[in-house]
Amino acid sequence: MRNLNICIDIDGTITNPYHFIPYLNKMYEKNLTEEECTTLDWKELYGENIEEILNKFHDEYISAYDEAEVVEGAKDIISELYEENNLYFVTARSTSLTEITTSWLNKKGFSDIDVYLLGSDYKIEKARELNCNIFIEDNPWNAMQIAKAGIDVILIDTNYNKDVDHERITRVKDWNQIKELIQSKY
């Protein structure tokens, strides 16, 4: 394994992809299950566009960001990868979430990794700026966009990204598979 530049998304990648569902269900008085979350089209799921949802969510459930848990294996494997590679958290989260995001990352043991809050799903420019070799992602739109830009994507398998397919995208079920893939392919 050579010294790689690895960009890592946060929500749905190092946290449970369905972490926000209970909060959104409460907010919109719905009972959507993980199995029913087959799209990231929030209008389809909750009846409002993403901006409206995020505004309400940040007013009512900002604490959800701090309450998220790191998925099994992510912390140890990221620590191992960090020893020989350059790691960066690159998230679509708004810069207004900088304090809660950095505090959470520090609390979870990720304080040594630089974090970039873009406020947009457009991650290509930042990935290029960081000379990204691999981008670890869960969002289907982001994954396709990044892959089409010529960057390898490791896609965490979820109910909402089943239709994503590209020669630069490799689907994995967990962080152990991410580690195996990086060790064997790079």
Image (cartoon, rainbow, N blue to C red):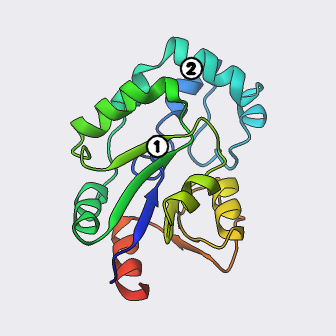
Q: Secondary structure at mark 1?
A: strand
Mark 1 — residue? 116
In this rendering, is residue 15 above or below 56? below
| x and y, in percent, of residue 130 in the image | 48, 60
Kind of residue at disc 1: Tyr
Element at label 2: helix
Which kind of residue does numbered mark 2 sit on? Answer: Phe
User: Where does the image place residue 167, in percent across and percent down from the top left?
Assistant: 67, 80
Residue furthest front in the image: 129
Q: Is residue 139 visible?
A: no
CA gap, disc 2 to disc 1?
21 Å
Relative to 78, say whether 182 is above or below: below
Left or right of 32: which side holds 61?
left
Residue 176: % across, % down: 33, 70
Taking the image as drawn, is residue 115 in sight?
yes
Q: Residue at x 22, y 35 (%)?
A: 107
Q: Residue at x 50, y 66 (%)?
A: 132
Is the residue marked by circle 1 packed among few (<14), some (14-19), or many (20+) residues within 10 Å? many
Given residues 28 and 124, the one toward you in this image is 124
Q: Quadrant of residue 162?
A: bottom right
- Determine which residue is flagged by label 2: 57
Sooner in the amino-acid sequence: mark 2 or mark 1? 2
**Would you say the residues marked 2 and 1 are in contact, meaning their CB atoms lie under 8 Å apart?**
no
Task: Give the residue at x 40% y 44%.
Answer: 115
Up/down of 149 relative to 47, above or below: below
The mark closer to the camera, 2 or 1, is 1
Q: How many numbered markers are drawn?
A: 2
- Relative depth, front residue between 178 and 3: 3
The residue at 30%/39% (across/down) is 105
